[in-house]
Image: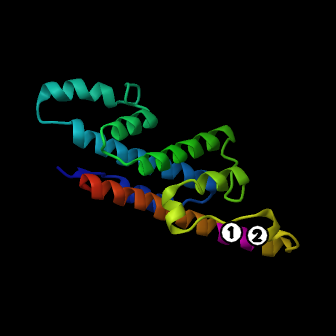
């Protein structure tokens, strides 16, 4: 049975239009969480009322399967997702937590963020993120601002492609459709 992620295209569009790094990372997390929710529902939901009655409380945000890492561990354990997808989702969870710890004050040229993004398999396959503070040394303020804006757009596009790659892997393995 195909999995339908009703909000996924809207979320991907929002991700592609995010105005800053924090918004982009939080939106990427939301897209992945929506995909996993759809995947779990396709596995557990059946037409039988009793199954829905038992499964619904498990999948709510305050249920035992409410946290994204618990969901991904379950899906990995069931063989529904690959270790590579699990690892990528785990990095996006780490980045979401980092945004929260930093009160949304993150950027795509911070060493911690660049390091974590480069741990994502989907990014490594496409285009590792390359940034070092030396790249902007000696630039005028205007040139530095233009360089950083271009870097932001490149990283945001890379994240959109990485999230889409994860979606494609889920679709290939689990008949996930948008």
User: Magenta region's main secondary structure?
Assistant: helix
Residue 122's tag is none
| Front position in the image: 38 or 131 | 131
Counting from the top left corner in percent of width and height, residue 131 is at: 71, 65
Mark 2 Cα-neighbour bin, 10 Å: few <14, some 14–19, many ≥20: few
**139 horizontally vs 85: left or right:** right
Q: Is residue 2 left or right of residue 106?
A: left
Q: Quadrant of residue 156?
A: bottom right
Tag 1 and tag 2, C-beta contact below 8 Å:
yes
Residue 148 on the magenta segment:
yes
Residue 12 visible to the viewer: yes
Colouring mode (rainbow / by chain / secondary structure / one colour):
rainbow
Location of residue 12 in the rendering, given as x and y in whole percent from the top left corner: 43, 59
Mark drawn on residue 145: 2
Q: Which residue is mark 1?
A: 149
* Callout 2: SS: helix
Q: Position of residue 52 (x, y in %)?
A: 19, 29
Left or right relative to 46: residue 65: right
Residue at figure coordinates x 49%, y 50% from the top left: 88
Q: Is residue 124 above or below residue 64?
A: below
Quadrant including the C terminus: bottom left
**Residue 116 spot, x, y in % from top left:** 61, 51
Q: Is residue 176 above or below residue 42?
A: below
Reply yes or no: does residue 124 show up in magenta: no
Q: Which residue is at a point 45% across and 57% down the rendered structure image?
A: 163
Q: Residue furthest right?
A: 138
Can residue 16 be spotted in the picture? no
Q: Residue, x 35% and y 30% (percent of image)?
A: 60
Q: CA distance from mark 1 to mark 2?
A: 6 Å
Residue 71 in which image quadrant: top left
* Range covered by the magenta-colored residues: 146-151
């Amino acid at each position: 049975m195909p999995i339908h992620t009703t909000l996924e295209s809207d979320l991907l569009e929002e991700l592609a239009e995010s105005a800053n790094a924090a918004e982009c990372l939080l939106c990427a997390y939301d897209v992945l969480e929506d995909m996993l929710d759809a995947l779990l529902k396709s596995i557990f939901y059946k037409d039988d009322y009793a199954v829905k009655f038992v499964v619904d409380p498990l999948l709510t945000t305050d249920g035992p399967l409410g946290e994204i890492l618990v969901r991904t561990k379950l899906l990995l354990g069931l063989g529904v997702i690959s270790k590579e997808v699990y690892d990528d989702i785990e990095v996006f969870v780490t980045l979401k937590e980092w945004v929260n710890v930093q009160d949304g004050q993150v950027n795509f040229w911070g060493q911690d963020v660049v390091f974590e993004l480069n741990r994502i398999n989907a990014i490594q396959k496409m285009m590792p993120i390359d940034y070092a503070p030396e790249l902007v040394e000696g630039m005028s303020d205007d040139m530095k601002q233009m360089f950083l804006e271009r870097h932001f757009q490149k990283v945001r596009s890379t994240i959109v492609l990485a999230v889409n790659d994860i979606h494609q892997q889920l679709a290939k393995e689990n008949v996930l459709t948008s």
